[in-house]
Image (cartoon, helix red, strand yellow):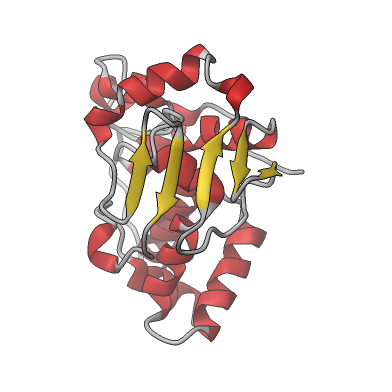
Amino acid sequence: MARYTGPSCRLCRRQNMELFLKGERCYTDKCAIKRRNYPPGQHGQGRAKVSDYGVQLREKQKVRRIYGILEKQFRTYFDKADRMKGVTGENLLILLERRLDNLVYRLGFASSRIEARQLVKHGHFTLNGRKVNIPSILVKTGDVIELKEKSRKITRITDSLDGVVRRGIPQWLDLDKDAFKGVLKSLPVREDITMPIQEQLIVELYSK
């Protein structure tokens, strides 16, 4: 399966904002944005004029990189959101938030979505008591995500759970830290997604 294998910090610098792609490192002074707050490349510090199309494209790329999704799958999510009732842009963000790897990250079992995707692929979690290894599964209201018994001593997971206070648990999720279990209490609404995303720009881009 195709995936991005380049340097993660380069993506943050290209977007000129922290995308928190490297977990705890993003909260330290080693963060690339704090050290070199300009776009990567030979002409990164030069001035560049950006067209309306460029602004829309950059917004789409930002959301793709936040959730770690390639173009074909992202377009599939957009088409599904467009067919749903309601506002297309908001539907898109809610679909992305419902991904299993995103919820593993949101619940604090992983320090980044990249790490969460790896943990899911390696079969460390169950969904409603059943083994799952597909990060893109869309979780439904009331579904239970639980860490397997044999995986509860993995240091990277326990360290991430100990540091989850820094990020906080969204109010639409419920974490039982002692039982290594989380529940999707309700679907998120637009106000719950606090990341600086202008989803309308993505709708305008795909509507051309």
Report the front residue among 36 and 110. 110
Please tell me which residue is depicted at 58% across the width and 61% down the height of the picture: 74
Q: Is residue 208 visible?
A: no
Residue 51: x %, y % from top left = 36, 65
The quadrant in which the N terminus is found is top right
Report the front residue among 148 and 164. 148
Report the front residue among 191 and 13. 191
Please tell me which residue is depicted at 35% across the width and 51% down the height of the picture: 173
Number of numbered discs = 0
In this rendering, the answer to whether 1 lies above or below 115 is: below
Which quadrant of the view contains residue 148? Answer: top right
Residue 145: x %, y % from top left = 52, 44
Q: Can residue 184 be seen in this view?
A: yes
- In the orientation shown, which residue stands out farthest toward the right? 1
In this rendering, the answer to whether 19 lies above or below 74 is: above
Residue 38: x %, y % from top left = 30, 32
Please tell me which residue is depicted at 43% across the width and 73% down the height of the picture: 91
Q: In this view, does 98 lie to the left or right of 107?
A: right
Residue 146: x %, y % from top left = 53, 39
Which quadrant of the view contains residue 28? Answer: top left
In this rendering, the answer to whether 82 lies above or below 28 is: below
Which quadrant of the view contains residue 191? Answer: bottom left
Report the front residue among 46 and 19. 19
Please tell me which residue is depicted at 28% across the width and 44% down the height of the picture: 47
In this rendering, the answer to whether 8 lies above or below 135 is: above
